[in-house]
């Protein structure tokens, strides 16, 4: 980067007074001689030894985690650029233009569609270097890299797909117009392009949803770790594959972005490379206006154990640094905060000459001989293809650590009046002069009329640029992003083979949690599906009675087990292994759901169908990581989420925040999530079996949320004839008394409260009130069925009767519904009940409390006595 050695430069930047310059010079010369004679490895060892000595002497010193504001890779360390620089710059300019035209055209036409240009303008060169030289797609000899794209840069990815022939000009014309595109309205023709990367909306194109800030970064880490998991378990060799993530510097403020950094370092995930686009701006202004985000991130990542590569200045600065023998540039940068750096980006060469280079005589001399235009065109590192390639190559070759590249860019790079402005993120409309200026800035082959009319531009197929683009992608396996779903069907074992004890329980006492764990253990033993099962827990395996699985399949650890566990002599001792099957994620629900998503999308990411079961306390699920679950839904995940100790009254002593009354309410909002609240082990077994069939055999893009309880009670056998009804949402459990010809009241219940409903029915029968009990396994499935019937009727189609109405057809009295969730859950089916019948819902609205289950159910009014009282009251009231 410059003529000064790194230690000398650091000393000059620090500005610290030197009490003995001669001694300092001797130390520098000695260290330089050591490097020259024995090489970097010995020099690093010596520095480590000196650091140890400093600690032993307790002098209160530790190495600074922040290095000078210059490139990590010096000029003499840069590899030769392997491509044609001029062609790649022209291609990048075309991508920029077509991306801009796409967004601006949409907003000229409609004015309300939104879209972003400035982010891609800053990241275009980062993307293009990856596309041309590093991002490997899946082909016969390579499993394919995983690339997480900065979401606001989606227009740039579409622009490249247009040049590659994957998207048409008409497709680009329907950016953010998914409902009016011919592919949607007519079933053929131009498709609408989604705002951000959405695999659900564009299932053949996008692999990973990144639109929710922070979800992409944590997901990339757990995908990288899951690839190691597949390799260590000998299921799939992922050794040659990389995970690349291009993220924003403002995005690093999200807790999810930062929460798994140490895991990546601890696991030595050198298959992971992050590129943080440090354009210094969020939506409204600077990321760290009064500081330097690159310095902050360097400290953070280095402290977490990552390899950090700073990509700060472009090649145009090399000559300036070479002439700077006093460290004036580095000192100036060390004293320039990002808010001022943003101002430099927004101003012209004359302003930067006067304001930056005019700070002192040393800087002014460096700028002598440069025109204002040359100063204006001094590139930041993230806009220099040669520097970017050097950083990427070093990151790809690095071993033993994940790597982060901190790439310094300008937001809105090249956008003229929009570059570096506070408003640049929302800059979507351009006047004719702006468009011509953009054309000129990037030397685009467009006439004035083409530029002002926002014409898309695609070179001829036989042009040098197009041939270059196609050849480089062919060498890297073809186009990307590209989502594929081909994978082998995995046979499902017979239900009785792993769950006979549940469907033929014959009154045995057990909790549904313990029943699930027993089923899981049996599934793991199956030769075909067993290896595909991925048990995931956050930190509660023993709590859920899963300790027996430690010995059976082990806990995954990339380094095995380097210690003798305290409980080694017990039958349920803790066991870690490189081929372990359980993923135990520690106290991190965000990490556990990211791990689940990696396994749940393995069928499309790796062509290998896996079956993850993530079991957790239900109140730490949808309420806590709901956005991550939505992202998993967008990615078309397949797997099971098990919300244990669910409901507001089953986890009696925990109280307030530790009692879940809403997870089923949230789960019902996710279209491809099937949510069930079974009361009995047999019901749960039928549900689990159906999910395995849908996901592994039929390969449907659904996932299941099943709530479990830790309360032991008698489990009845489940008749085969009601299995189908269980899956549709409810079934007739029985009449009380059993020989009642007609019933006066219908009681509905789910999960933990069904036992209270049954007790209430028995009490009412003693009083002479004949009752029918309906076991509700899924309120949301009943509500969806009812809505489907209603919508069909509105469209004047043959709608039929809702399933819940069919199930209730034999009675004509009031209906009482009770759950361990807020009343809004059973209220969701009110519109689909038979006409003329009173409907009373009982639930657990409000804050939780700590007490016994009996006291809690009495407090919330969902115990047997409360249900009886509600039934009596409803039975005495006149019909509505």
Image: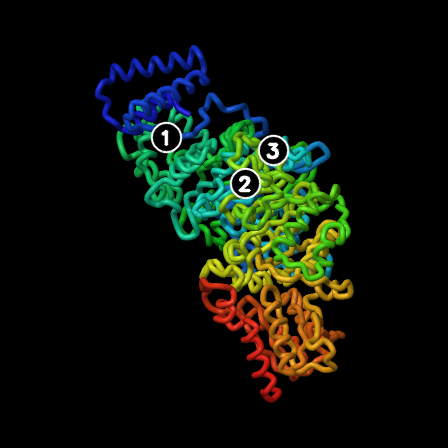
Judge whether residue 507 can be spotted in this image: yes
Q: Along the line of sight, which residue is nearer the eye, 331 or 577? A: 577
Image depth: mark 3 or mark 1 in front: 3
Q: Earlier in the sequence, mark 2 or mark 1?
A: 1
Q: Is residue 297 left or right of residue 703?
A: left
Q: Earlier in the sequence, mark 3 or mark 2?
A: 2
Disc 3 vs disc 1: Cβ atoms closer than 8 Å?
Answer: no
Disc 2 vs disc 1: Cβ atoms closer than 8 Å?
Answer: no
Disc 3 vs disc 2: Cβ atoms closer than 8 Å?
Answer: no
Which quarter of the rendering shows the N terminus? top left
Q: Residue at x 61, y 47 (%)?
A: 158
Mark 1 lies on residue: 68
Residue 268 - label: none
| The furthest residue to the top | 37
Mark 3 lies on residue: 578
Q: Earlier in the sequence, mark 3 or mark 1?
A: 1
Q: Along the line of sight, which residue is nearer the eye, 668 or 326? A: 668
The image shows residue 874 at horizontal and vertical percentages of: 58, 83
Q: Residue at x 53, y 56 (%)?
A: 626
Q: Quadrant of residue 655?
A: bottom left
Q: Measure the alpha-carbon separation of dots 2 and 1.
A: 28 Å
Which quarter of the rendering shows the C terminus? bottom right
Q: Residue at x 70, y 36 (%)?
A: 139
Mark 2 lies on residue: 221
Considering the numbered disc 1 on the image, is that residue within a helix, a strand or a loop? loop
Q: In the image, is residue 399 above or below residue 296?
A: above
């Amino acid at each position: 980067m410059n003529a000064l050695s790194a230690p000398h430069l650091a000393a000059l930047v620090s500005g610290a007074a030197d009490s003995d310059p001669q001694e300092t010079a001797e130390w520098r010369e000695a260290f330089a001689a050591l490097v020259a004679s024995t090489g970097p490895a010995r020099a690093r060892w010596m520095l480590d030894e000196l650091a140890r000595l400093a600690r032993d002497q307790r002098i209160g010193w530790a190495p600074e985690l922040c290095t000078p504001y210059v490139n990590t890779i010096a000029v003499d360390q840069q590899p030769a650029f392997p491509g044609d620089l001029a062609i790649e710059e022209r291609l990048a300019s075309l991508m920029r233009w077509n991306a801009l035209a796409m967004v601006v055209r949409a907003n000229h036409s409609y004015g309300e569609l939104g879209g972003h240009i400035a982010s891609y303008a800053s990241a275009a060169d980062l993307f293009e270097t990856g596309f041309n030289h590093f991002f490997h797609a899946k082909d016969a000899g390579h499993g394919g890299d995983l690339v997480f794209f900065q979401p606001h840069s989606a227009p740039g990815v579409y622009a490249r797909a247009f040049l590659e022939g994957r998207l048409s000009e008409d497709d680009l014309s329907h950016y953010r117009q998914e409902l009016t595109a011919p592919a949607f309205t007519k079933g053929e023709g131009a498709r609408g392009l989604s705002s951000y990367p959405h695999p659900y909306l564009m299932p053949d194109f996008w692999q990973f949803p990144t639109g929710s800030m922070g979800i992409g970064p944590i997901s990339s880490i757990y995908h990288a770790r899951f690839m190691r998991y597949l390799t260590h378990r000998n299921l799939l060799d992922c050794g040659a594959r990389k995970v690349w993530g291009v993220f924003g510097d403002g995005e690093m403020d999200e807790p999810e972005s930062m929460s798994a950094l140490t895991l990546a370092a601890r696991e030595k995930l050198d298959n992971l490379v992050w590129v943080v686009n440090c354009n210094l701006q969020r939506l409204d202004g600077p990321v760290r206006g009064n500081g330097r985000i690159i310095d902050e991130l360097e400290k953070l990542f280095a402290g977490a154990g990552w390899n950090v590569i700073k990509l700060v200045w472009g090649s145009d600065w090399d000559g300036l640094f070479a002439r700077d023998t006093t460290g004036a540039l580095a000192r100036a940068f060390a004293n320039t905060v990002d808010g001022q750096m943003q101002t430099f980006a927004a101003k012209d060469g004359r302003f930067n000459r006067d304001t930056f280079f005019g700070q002192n005589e040393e800087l002014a001399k460096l700028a002598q001989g440069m025109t204002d235009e040359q100063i204006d065109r001094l590139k930041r590192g993230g806009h220099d293809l040669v520097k970017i390639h050097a950083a990427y190559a070093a990151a790809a070759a690095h071993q033993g650590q994940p790597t982060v590249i901190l790439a310094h860019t300008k937001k809105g790079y090249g956008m003229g009046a929009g570059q570096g402005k506070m408003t640049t993120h929302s800059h979507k409309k351009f006047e004719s002069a702006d468009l011509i200026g953009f054309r000129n800035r990037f030397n685009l082959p467009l006439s004035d009329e083409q530029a002002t009319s926002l014409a898309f531009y695609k070179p001829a197929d036989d042009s040098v640029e197009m041939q270059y683009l196609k050849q480089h992608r062919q060498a890297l396996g073809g186009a990307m992003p590209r989502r594929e779903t081909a994978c082998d069907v995995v046979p499902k074992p017979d239900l009785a083979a792993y769950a006979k004890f549940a469907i033929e329980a014959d009154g045995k006492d057990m909790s549904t949690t313990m029943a699930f764990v027993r089923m899981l253990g049996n599934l793991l033993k199956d030769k075909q599906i067993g290896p595909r099962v991925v048990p995931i827990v956050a930190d509660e395996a023993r709590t859920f009675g899963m300790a027996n699985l430690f010995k059976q399949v082990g806990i995954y650890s990339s380094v095995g087990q380097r210690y003798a566990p305290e409980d080694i002599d017990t039958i349920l001792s803790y066991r870690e292994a490189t081929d372990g099957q359980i993923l135990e994620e520690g106290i991190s629900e965000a990490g556990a759901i990211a791990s689940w998503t990696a396994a749940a999308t393995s069928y499309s990411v790796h062509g290998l169908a896996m079956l993850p079961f993530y079991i957790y306390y239900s109140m730490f699920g949808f309420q806590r990581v709901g956005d991550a679950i939505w992202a998993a839904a967008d990615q078309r995940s397949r797997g099971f989420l098990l919300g244990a100790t669910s409901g507001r009254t089953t986890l009696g002593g925990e109280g307030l925040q530790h009692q879940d009354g809403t997870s089923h309410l949230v789960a019902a909002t996710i279209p491809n999530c099937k949510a069930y609240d079974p009361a009995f082990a047999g019901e749960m077994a039928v549900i689990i079996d159906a999910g395995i069939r849908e996901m592994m055999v039929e390969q449907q893009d659904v996932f299941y949320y099943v709530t479990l309880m830790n309360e032991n009670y008698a489990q009845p056998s489940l008749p085969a004839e009601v299995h189908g009804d269980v899956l549709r949402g409810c079934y007739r459990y029985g009449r009380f008394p059993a020989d009642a010809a007609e019933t006066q009241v219908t009681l509905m219940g789910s999960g933990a409260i069904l036992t209270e409903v049954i007790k209430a029915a028995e009490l009412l029968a003693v009083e002479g009130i004949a009752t029918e009990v309906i076991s509700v396994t899924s309120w949301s499935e009943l509500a969806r069925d009812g809505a489907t019937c209603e919508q069909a009727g509105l469209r004047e189609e043959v709608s039929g009767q809702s399933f819940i109405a069919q199930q209730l057809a034999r009675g004509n009295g009031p209906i009482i519904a009770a759950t361990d969730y807020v009343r809004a859950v059973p209220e969701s089916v009110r519109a689909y009940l038979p006409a003329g019948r009173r409907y009373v819902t009982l639930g657990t609205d409000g804050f939780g409390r700590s007490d016994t289950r009996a006291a809690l159910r009495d407090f919330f009014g969902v115990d047997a006595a409360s249900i009886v009282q509600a039934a009596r009251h409803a039975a005495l009231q006149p019909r509505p």
